[in-house]
Image (cartoon, rainbow, N blue to C red):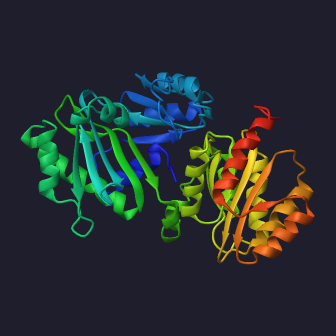
Amino acid sequence: MNIHEYQARRILAGLGLPVPRGEVAATPEQAREIAERLGVPTVVKAQVLVGGRGKAGGVKLAASPDDAAARARDILGMQIRGITVRQVLVSEAVDIASEIYLGIVLDRASRGVALMASAEGGVEIEEVARQSPDKVLRVAVDPFLGLADYQAREIGFGLGLEPGLVRDFVPIARGLYDAFVRCDASLAEINPLVVTTSGHLAAIDAKMVLDDNALPRHPELESLRDAAAENPDEARARAAGLSYVKLDGSIGCVVNGAGLAMATMDVVKLYGGEPANFLDIGGGARAERVAAALGILLSDPSVRVVLFNIFGGITRCDEVARGIVGTLRELATDLPIVVRLVGTNEAEGRRILAEAGLVAVADMDDAARGAVAALGGVPEGRP
């Protein structure tokens, strides 16, 4: 779950990190009032769950309260990567001498957590890593011991900070790691962490991605979810108990089990197709959940073929078949539907599908090849 900058900043500020004062506004008048309370020049920043706000004109300096209201009026309602800006953060402006990237990330290669930093702050770290990997510093964090002071100092000196600033940098790095662990995050970053012209460090931007699977342990964090900023299909899927991620392809995949879902997407790509989504209906899925999954895919105009890949263990093949047939009775479609059905109650599932005019195959490769071949008969940009 992504959260907004202002929400991430509040978490970091609560742990004692040097975050500039600021408040959220939904109208130009509110922006003016906030700027008056702050009593200093401000920066007005669009609050959307996408990057590239600065390049899109979503970050503007304001010299006075009236200026803050004008800047908010410019930003509110604008589109940034297809997302409408509904609120802005009005924060005290900081005189910047230099910028640093600082992040805590899951490092899947080492199966651990890594602290990453770069003196090339204020830009996308992926771009820095791609063009100048030597400029990205990295240290592995022991999950039992946590981030050690000496590791943070090593990064601080590696960034070229003066000894006094390194002393200030250590608690900031440790505080960011603390936020990462406390919130069960998969990413926590400050970009940029700036050195001010007065010689202090300030976290002027923050981003956190929280692990959805850990949210039952954090009911206070669930309330941070911005449903209006989410993909509508992903919100529908979550409400139905489905794990769904929208992708850019045209073959909609419905699979039981995350591992099988990943393998299915790989096989689709192997035979020349592109998956339109990751969709895991989970173990033991009943017909209602299968129907919800198929309904989401049929409502997606980018989906031109639907591929079911079901390996029935806890999940019963006859329940999957009933979900498919029931949905097609309610939502008529001309889209090709390819079904691979193997496992518990397989024969009954095949019978149910056959009575509805559908045929299930037993081999995953055959199913993937069939889905890719079916694309040739479906026009691009279907209504």
Foreground of the two, 369 or 155:
369
State the residue in front, 181 or 199. 181
Depth order, front residue of 302/3? 302
Whether residue 25 can be seen here: yes
Percent from the top left, x then y, of residue 317? 75, 72
Q: Is residue 304 visible?
A: no
Report the side of 230 relative to 127 (left or right): right
Is 216 left, or right, of 109 in this rendering? right
Find the residue positioned furthest to the left: 163
Asked where in the image residue 135 lies, by quadrant, the reply is top left
**Residue 34 spot, x, y in % from top left:** 47, 36
Image x and y of residue 338, in percent: 76, 54
Q: Residue at x 27, y 40 (%)?
A: 202
Residue 314, x across and y down, in percent: 65, 78
Total tally of numbered discs in the picture: 0
**Residue at the spot 70% in from the left edge and 54% down from the top edge:** 367
| Residue shown at 50% from the left, 23% from the top | 57
Find residue 258 and report its image quarter. Answer: bottom right
Asked if residue 261 is positioned above or below residue 226 in the image, the reply reads below
| 118 or 309, nearer to the observer | 309
- 30 is higher (above) or lower (below) than 168: above
Quadrant (top left/top right/bottom left/bottom right) for the C terminus:
top right
